[in-house]
Structure formats: structure tokens, C-alpha cells
Image: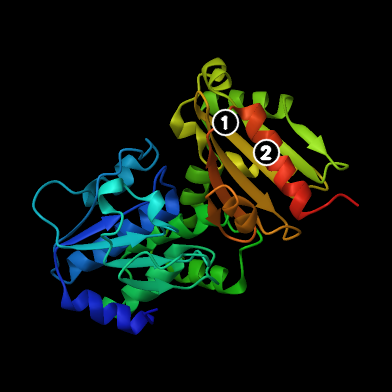
């Protein structure tokens, strides 16, 4: 494992950077990657983000200036990618450097900068950028604030620590407009998203005196609501709003016979260990996996795994 100083030296030595983000990219992977790309360009390096086909409308204009257009890239960097299975197949086994905050990162890259105590990869990239080239630019501060705030639920999740808030304060000092960004990402929704939330709540399943909650999002619900991929950001937080909730599943149908499962816990159960049973992973209180099953079967599988890991009293 590299230290931040060693990672900075490695990045100074190379050029021609292809920066990778994970499948179904969120704000942390995209904006951490974009901020790093900006810093490398400030150093006179050639750097760009590989064009992730899953980028939503929310993030497309934000990362557009950093996307790969043409030319060869000789050094690959993965940002916020917990496992090589979350990368495009062509890059599996071909990553030179991983920058990550997932504790269970298996070390798939040739070199790794890892800090599992960070709430977001953005916090780690902030320290790396300042080691590389001094203070953050306002653009980099904005990108990193998006990364940090989206991975911490606007600083409301259990992964938020004093260090997370200090990092966010520093990003604000460097030019991030926290008020505008918080409204854009946490208090502004399309009509389709609002209708979708209504359907999710109407079909919410609760067990163990509301300690366990399951939210299901089917393709049919998406069609009924008129919702798009862009409306699916942070759906995983919805079942956790039930009073008394401790373990929550959000099961989203991706296509017939295939579902994405997001798990959120209060620490009663290790979410990463639970998802690892199905080839997934993440953090102790927030993790995910993909199941080749319909939503109803996926719910039963996750309940069975939970009952084994956390038997009902």
C-alpha cells in the first residue's frame, strides 16, 4: 500500500493518464476522478477520464470537460473502485494505480492508495492533490465537495466523521458553494423521481418491528412514474427513513432476471460481509451486490442471508 506522499511521487513520474470510474457511477467516483484529472493537467500532464457509458444526466455536464476524446493513455488510475469487477472488462487486470476508500479492496491494481477510514474517496483525493500541487482550485473544491457530500448523504450518514466535516469546510474555503450544491444534489427532484418515491413507499415491506425494511424498484414502477436513470440516485437511503430501522435493502430491477441490491445498516450487521456472500462488497454500513434473480426472489435471498448473519431474537 502506498502513502499519499508515495502516490504523489508515482504520479509525478508518469504521464498519459486514463482515469477509470466504476459501473453505474455515483458522485464520488466521477467527481474524485475529475478533480484528480484537473490537478494532473495543472501539472502539465496529459490526463482524461475514460468515457463511462453509465454517466447520468446529472453528472454529464460536470465531468464533460475531463472526458477522454482522443489519443493513447499509458497509465491507468481507478478512483473509488472497490473491485476490478466494477470496471469495464478491458481494464480488469490492467490497472496501474487504485485510489480507494473501500476497506475490503482486494488489491487488484499494481499499486494502491487506500484509506478505509474516509467517508469518501474525494477526501483522499483532496489530500493527494494538495500534496501534488498545493491548494485546490475552486473547480477542484467544487468537484470534491460533490464527491464527499454525495457519499455521506449530505453529511447525514454514519460514515460522517469530524474529519469528513473538516475536509468539507476546507473545500468550502477553497471555493465550493455548499448552499447551491446541497440544493442541486439533495433538495431538487424531477416529477418522475417524486412519483417513483411514492410508489416505493406504497410498496415498502417491513419486518422485525420495522428494524428491517425492503424497498423494491421494478422496471414497471419506473415506467409508471416516468422516471429515468437520472432519478435513481440515492434510492438506497429511502427505507432507512422508517423509524427504528437498523438493516435496510433497496432492490432495483435492472433487467428481467437481474437486480442491483443496496444494503444500509446501523452497524448491527456488516453490510459488506452480507453482500460478499453474493459477490458484492463495500463498507460495513453501506454495500451492494448484483443478483441474477427477479426482485421477489432477490428479497427472499437477502432476507435469508440476513437471518443467518443476524438471527432473530
Viewer-closest of 252 and 38: 252
Evaluate whether residue 204 shows in this view.
yes
Picture quadrant of residue 249? top right
Picture quadrant of residue 82? bottom left
Disc 1 is placed on an element classified as loop
Position of the N terminus, as image quadrant, is bottom left
What's the residue at 22%, 49% (across, down)? 65
The crowding category of the residue bearing disc 2, from other C-alpha atoms within 10 Å (few below 14, some 14 to 19, many at least 20), is some
What's the residue at 40%, 39% (across, down)? 58
Mark toward the start of the polypeptide (1 vs 2): 1
What's the residue at 63%, 58% (across, down)? 273
Q: Position of residue 258 (x, y in %)?
A: 51, 31
- Numbered mark located on residue 301 in the image: 2
Residue bearing the label numbered 1: 293
What's the residue at 16%, 73% (across, down)? 14
Q: Is residue 136 left or right of residue 103?
A: left
Amino acid at each position: 500500500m502506498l502513502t499519499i506522499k508515495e502516490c504523489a511521487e508515482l504520479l509525478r513520474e508518469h504521464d498519459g493518464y486514463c482515469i477509470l470510474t466504476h459501473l453505474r457511477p455515483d458522485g464520488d467516483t466521477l467527481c474524485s476522478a475529475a478533480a484528480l484529472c484537473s490537478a494532473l493537467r495543472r501539472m502539465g500532464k496529459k490526463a482524461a477520464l475514460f468515457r463511462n457509458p453509465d454517466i447520468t444526466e446529472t453528472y454529464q455536464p460536470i465531468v464533460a470537460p475531463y472526458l477522454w476524446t482522443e489519443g493513447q493513455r499509458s497509465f491507468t488510475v481507478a478512483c473509488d473502485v472497490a473491485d476490478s469487477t466494477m470496471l469495464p472488462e478491458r481494464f480488469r487486470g490492467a490497472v496501474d494505480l487504485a485510489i480507494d476508500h473501500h476497506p475490503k479492496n482486494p488489491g487488484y491494481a499494481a499499486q494502491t492508495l487506500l484509506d478505509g477510514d474516509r467517508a469518501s474517496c474525494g477526501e483522499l483525493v483532496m489530500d493527494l492533490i494538495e500534496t501534488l500541487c498545493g491548494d485546490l482550485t475552486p473547480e477542484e473544491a467544487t468537484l470534491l465537495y460533490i464527491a464527499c457530500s454525495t457519499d455521506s448523504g449530505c453529511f447525514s450518514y454514519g460514515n460522517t466523521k469530524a474529519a469528513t466535516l473538516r475536509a468539507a469546510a476546507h473545500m468550502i474555503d477553497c471555493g465550493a458553494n455548499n448552499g447551491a450544491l446541497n440544493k442541486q444534489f439533495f433538495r431538487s427532484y424531477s416529477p418522475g423521481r417524486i412519483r417513483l418515491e411514492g410508489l416505493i413507499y406504497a410498496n415498502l415491506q417491513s419486518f422485525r418491528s420495522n428494524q428491517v425494511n425492503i424497498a423494491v424498484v421494478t422496471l414497471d414502477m419506473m415506467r409508471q412514474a416516468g422516471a429515468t436513470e437520472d432519478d435513481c440516485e440515492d434510492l438506497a437511503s429511502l427505507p432507512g427513513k422508517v423509524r427504528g430501522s437498523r438493516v435496510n435493502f433497496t432492490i432495483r430491477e435492472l433487467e428481467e432476471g437481474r437486480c442491483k441490491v443496496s444494503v444500509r445498516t446501523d452497524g448491527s450487521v456488516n453490510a459488506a460481509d452480507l453482500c460478499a456472500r453474493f459477490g458484492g462488497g463495500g463498507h460495513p454500513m453501506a454495500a451492494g451486490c448484483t443478483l441474477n434473480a427477479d426482485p421477489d426472489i432477490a428479497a427472499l435471498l437477502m432476507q435469508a442471508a440476513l437471518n443467518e448473519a443476524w438471527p432473530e431474537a
